[in-house]
Each structure stands twice: as structure tokens, then as C-alpha cells.
Image (tube, grey):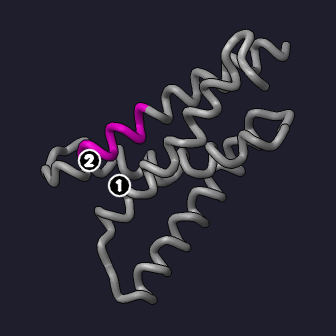
Amino acid sequence: MVEQQLRIRRYTAYGLLAVCLVTIVLVWSGSGFPLRPPAVLVFVLTAPGWALISYVNVRHLSVTWISAVGISLAIALIVAQVLVLTHTWHPEAAIVVLASVTTIPLVHHVLRSRPGGAR
């Protein structure tokens, strides 16, 4: 059972890492590619919160995802508020920085959930 949970965590972290990297590439390139809005939306709604909530031992997967969405939205609102209050409204740069910072705990989740990895 524990091995299955670690496998799910590892695959989810891989998927969210891919979402982070796709978001960084699409936003950084500045293209009007039609995949850009959905990629950014999926990133903003899931990755930052999941990267944080997965450090907590939540028994139910649904609670993990509900918490991940709530935390992700809170982080996005805080970042947006900081941009407004500092008069530095650069949402593209904020998304790239947030995605880059989010990759750090996601990589840690991949490494710690490997079979025989450090837990």
C-alpha cells in the first residue's frame, strides 16, 4: 500500500513537472500558441499547492487534490497582490518565477518517492 502511494506521488510529481516546464516554455516564448492559456491554468490551479500539500501525510487522494487547488489559488492571489502593491505588474515573469520555484519541491518529491530513495 505504501509503495503504491509512493508510486502515485512520483508519477504525479513527474506530470506536474511536465506542466511546469511546458508553462515556462510557453510563457517565456511569448507565443500566442493556443495551448498557453490551458497550460497556465492547469499549472496555477494545481502545481504549487500539490508541491506543498504532498509534504503532509494526507490519507485520501481527494483531500490532497482539493487542498492543492485551494493552496495554489491562495499562492496565486498572494503573488498577484504583491505585484499590484509593488507596482510591478509583470504576470508573465511572475508565472515563470513561480513555475521555476515550484519545480524544486516537485523534484524533491520525485527523488524521495523513488524505490529505495530517501524518505
Residue ranking furthest to the front: 118
- Quarter of the figure with the N terminus: top right
- Residue 74: percent from the left, percent from the top? 61, 66
CA distance separating discs 1 and 2 = 13 Å
Residue nearest the observer in this picture, 3 or 97: 97
What residue is at 45 percent from the left and 47 percent from the top? 43
Category of crowding for the residue at label 2, using alpha-carbon neighbours closer than 10 angstroms: few (below 14), some (14–19), many (at least 20): some
The quarter of the picture where residue 57 lies is top right
Does the stretch in magenta take in 23?
Answer: yes
Tell whether 83 sits left or right of 34: right
Category of crowding for the residue at label 1, using alpha-carbon neighbours closer than 10 angstroms: few (below 14), some (14–19), many (at least 20): many
Specify start and end residues of the magenta stretch as a single range.
18-26
Callout 2 secondary element? helix
Q: Main secondary structure of the magenta part?
A: helix
Q: Which of marks 1 and 2 is nearer the N terminus?
A: 2
The quarter of the picture where residue 80 lies is bottom left
- Residue 60: percent from the left, percent from the top? 82, 34
What residue is at 41 percent from the left and 37 percent from the top? 19
Q: Is residue 94 above or below residue 89?
A: above
Does the stretch in magenta take in 60?
Answer: no
Q: In this view, does 51 lie above or below 27?
A: above
The residue that mark 2 highlights is 36
Residue 96 - label: 1
What residue is at 32 percent from the left and 79 percent from the top? 89
